[in-house]
Amino acid sequence: MKFFVDTADVKDIRELNDAGLLDGVTTNPSLIMKAGRDIMDVTKEICSIVEGPVSAEVTAVEYSGMMREAEVLSKIADNICIKVPLTLDGLKACKALTSDGRMVNVTLCFSANQALLAAKAGATFISPFIGRLDDMGIDGMELIGEIRTIYDNYDFGTEILAASIRTVNHVKQAAMIGADVATVPPATLKALVKHPLTDKGLEAFLADWAKTGQKIG
Ligand code: E4P
């Protein structure tokens, strides 16, 4: 499973990338707002840190505006992946952009039928939002399973990018179902390393080591 980090915070991106954990980055207008920086500047910096796809989202809602914005965003770097919303205009833009060799992430997916349409439009990634469905009392993970089945039935090449991840369990479940990628907030990504028995075990080893009075090197 590939890991993308879901943030526009370059400090977190650098730290996770240096740890070898990152295959890409996803941003959205809310994350750009949170970062408090100019979209072009911050996206350029992110693209220089991470080698993999960096999703940058269009904000126009009509096809021609999306295409204009995609043109501007694409010029930032070669690893830009254009993010479009799951609307008819978004799918049209997806088809045009992927036919032109661009990477496209179709976002705001909440149903298997939407995911089917995105695959038919040639999407590089489909982003089903797990947490936002869970928030409504609908099992978001079920959607990941449905999309996996449909994509496998027809051999679609579109990668399932599990999004709106809120917990470490979301990551595990998405991996077990076979999502190709998980985009995870920095804190959740860092929390994956944690286990109380690891901390306890390390503490015991260090206590015993101190009793030997030895040093390595
Ligand atoms: C995906 O690309 C989105 O940026 C993100 O996962 C949305 O997550 P949220 O529901 O926590 O805002």
Image: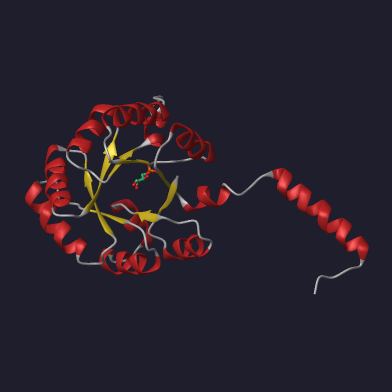
Residue at 37% x, 59% y is: 8
Q: Quadrant of the C terminus?
A: bottom right
Which residue sits furthest left? 64
Image quadrant where residue 174 sits: top left
Taking the image as shown, residue 21 lies to the left or right of residue 215, namely left
Taking the image as shown, residue 89 lies to the left or right of residue 200, namely left
Residue at 35% x, 31% y is: 148
How does the figure colour the protein chain or chains?
Answer: secondary structure
Which residue sits furthest bottom? 217
Q: Nearer the viewer, residue 125 or 58?
A: 125
Residue at 43% x, 48% y is: 2
Q: Nearer the viewer, residue 214 or 66?
A: 214
Residue at 9% x, 47% y is: 63
- Where is residue 20 drawn, in percent x and y? 51, 60
Q: Nearer the viewer, residue 53 or 70?
A: 53
Q: Quadrant of the N terminus?
A: top left
- Where is residue 100 drawn, in percent x and y? 13, 54
- Where is residue 43 drawn, in percent x and y? 31, 64
Work out whether 56 lies above or below 63.
Answer: below
Q: Nearer the viewer, residue 215 or 171?
A: 215
Number of numbered tags placed on the structure image: 0
Image quadrant where residue 102 sits: bottom left
Where is ligand 1, by quadrant?
Answer: top left
- Where is residue 110 drawn, in percent x and y? 30, 32
Taking the image as shown, residue 45 lies to the left or right of residue 117, namely right
